[in-house]
Amino acid sequence: MIRYDVADTVATITLDRPDAMNSLTAETKDALLGALRRAAGDPAIRAVLLTGSGRAFCAGQDLREHAGNLEAGRGLADTVRVHYNPIVELITTMAKPVVAAVNGVAAGAGASLAFACDLRVASEKAKFALAFAGIGLVPDSGASWTLQRLVGQGRAAELLLLGEPLDAARALELGLVTRVVPADDVLKTAYELAVRLARGPTLAYAATKRALAYAATHSLPDALAMEADLQDECAATQDHLNATRAFLAKERPTFRAE
């Protein structure tokens, strides 16, 4: 259900239920959360790539399993709190850049997973569908938080209330994805981007993620204070000292996350 591969200090996590469009069962979500925790906790991993196998990135919740829970009177089986929330919180707070390679359909929670990543490379054949309202549900997996930060509150309301699918070109126009590439190039392009990030100042990237998350919900004076604190932390690293020396020597810096 989940493949975990490591190369060039990048952990590639692949949702691997192609016959079910990589939809998410409880077992798949457990495995995905475990893979993300493994990547987050491994000091040898400096960036993460999330993608899907086959023609879909992730079609969201497995509705067959969900229908069974409903018929048995289990409702959502608390999957939002037990699975989706921890997964999205880990992606957004991980002290490493996370890149999504959106190779196909990203629907419901699958779209939310992509939006939680730091950067998104989409295939020209990718489609995004926020169809929560279509089955009488509200957005979950962080979509109410991430989406309006990507496209603004008004556009987020439109996308969530109407639930109309978006093709890759429209997603790029709205700012939902970082770039759109031919279908055959999506994984390669996203991997190259992840490798570039892995070779960069990962400590500074982690601090940047913290700064953005903090500033999104605090005043300007509070954000300025947080920036100052984080800048002090980064300035005390060996990476910053080495990069400053390299800049003065007109050399390319090497970042070692120390």
Image (tube, rainbow, N blue to C red):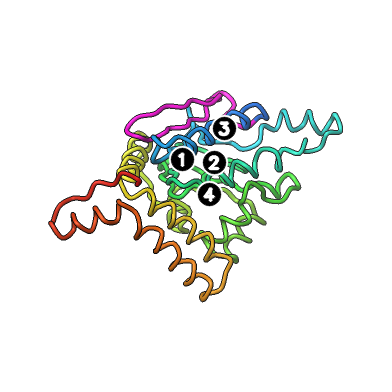
CB-based contact (under 8 Å), mark 3 and mark 4: no
Query: Circle 2: is it few (<14), some (14-19), or many (20+) Cα within 10 Å?
Result: many
Dot 1 or dot 3, earlier in sequence: 3
Checking the image for residue 106, the label placed there is 2
Checking the image for residue 92, the label placed there is 4
Q: x, y percentage for residue 194?
A: 36, 41
Task: Assess whether residue 7 is covered by the magenta stretch.
Answer: yes
CB-based contact (under 8 Å), mark 1 and mark 3: no
Q: CA distance from mark 2 to mark 3?
A: 16 Å
- Point out the frontmost of discs 4 and 2: 4
Q: Is residue 240 above or below residue 12?
A: below
Q: Quadrant of the N terminus?
A: top right
- Which of the pair 231/46 is nearer the observer? 231
Q: CA distance from mark 1 to mark 3?
A: 16 Å
Dot 2 or dot 3, earlier in sequence: 3
Q: x, y percentage for residue 196?
A: 30, 44
Q: Residue at x 47, y 55 (%)?
A: 209
Query: Circle 4: is it few (<14), some (14-19), or many (20+) Cα within 10 Å?
Result: many
Identify the residue under disc 1.
102
Identify the residue under disc 3.
32
- Which of the pair 8/132 is nearer the observer? 8
Dot 4 or dot 2, earlier in sequence: 4
CB-based contact (under 8 Å), mark 1 and mark 2: yes
Which segment is the magenta one? 1-24
Helix, strand or loop for disc 3? helix
Dot 3 or dot 4, earlier in sequence: 3
